[in-house]
Every structure is written in C-alpha cells, then in structure tokens.
Image (tube, rainbow, N blue to C red):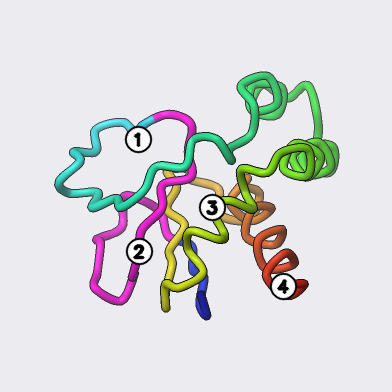
Amino acid sequence: MSNIKIKRVYETAQETDGYRVLVDRLWPRGMKKEVAKIDCWAKEITPSTELRKDYHEGRILWEEFVQRYQGELASTTVLDDLICELVDREVVTLVFAGKNVEQNHVMVLLQVMQEKMEKQ
C-alpha cells in the first residue's frame, strides 16, 4: 500500500480512491451502500463507544482522546491484520462521515497506520 488517503463518505466516490475502507462504527446517515461504494467496513478499528461518546459529549479534550485511541489501537492486533490485508493495494482511502476533518479519529488512525507501515 503505497498511498493512504482520507475522504468524507459524502464526497463522490472516484476511481482514484482505490480500495475504500469505511472507518466509522456506525453507518453514515442517509448514505446508500451503492452510493458509498465501500469495499470494506472496518468497525473494529474505530474508537470504542465509550471513548467516542466521552469526546463528542465534551467530557474529554482532543489530546486525551488521541492518547486513549492510540492506546486502544495498540492493545489489539486488528489494525495489524487490516494493514496486512491492504498491503498489496496501490491506493487505499479511509472513508469517514465526520464533519470535523482536523480533529477526527481518522487523523489518528492514519498516523498510526503510517507509523506501523514504516516499521515493516
């Protein structure tokens, strides 16, 4: 996997997206499966429900969310398994529904994936 991109699910799917992986625990509201063109739904690598709610309801700040999510990712082999599954793909696009592109779990996930791939 030489190129990992991110994209909101509400943006039009394109051929240049390559293999599209939905990285949200919940299916995006109002999005039909045939329009989303998702190749893989990786619910297992999303933040836990508790962590997601703590952040979205304002009980924790972004910095704590990042640390806790990184900890969740480090405590499972699911992400390693997904990377192995995607390694032969030329382009992978992590697709998400969130409105906030800067402070979103996808940014953390992307960073962790890139770090793991550099070590391989």
| 67 over 82 or under it: above or below | above
Q: Which residue is mark 3?
A: 82
In 3D space, how far apart are the residues under numbered discs 3 and 1 (Cα atoms)? 21 Å
Please give the name of the residue rendered at 49% of the width and 35% of the height, measured from the top-left corner.
Answer: 43
- Say which mark, if any, is on residue 120: 4
Q: Dot 4: within a 10 Å radius of its alpha carbon, few (fewer than 14), some, or many (20 or more) residues?
A: few
Q: Amino acid at mark 1?
A: Pro
Q: Which residue is mark 1?
A: 28
- Residue annotated with mark 2: 19
- Compare residues 41 and 57 and report the one nearer the observer: 41
Horizontal arrangement in the rendering, residue 113 relative to residue 71 (left or right): left
Q: Is residue 93 above or below residue 95?
A: below
Residue 45: quarter of image: top right
Whether residue 66 is visible, yes or no, is yes
Question: Looking at the image, which residue is at 25% across and 62% down?
Answer: 13
Callout 1 environment at 10 Å: few (<14), some (14 to 19), or many (20+)?
some
Reading the chain from its start, which is encountered first: label 2 or label 4?
A: 2
Residue 91 pos. (x, y %):
42, 74
Q: Amino acid at mark 3?
A: Leu
For label 2, count other residues whose C-alpha is less than 10 Å away and answer few (under 14), some (14-19) or many (20+).
many
What residue range appears in magenta?
A: 7-26
CA distance separating discs 2 and 4:
21 Å
Residue 117 x/y as whole percent? 67, 70
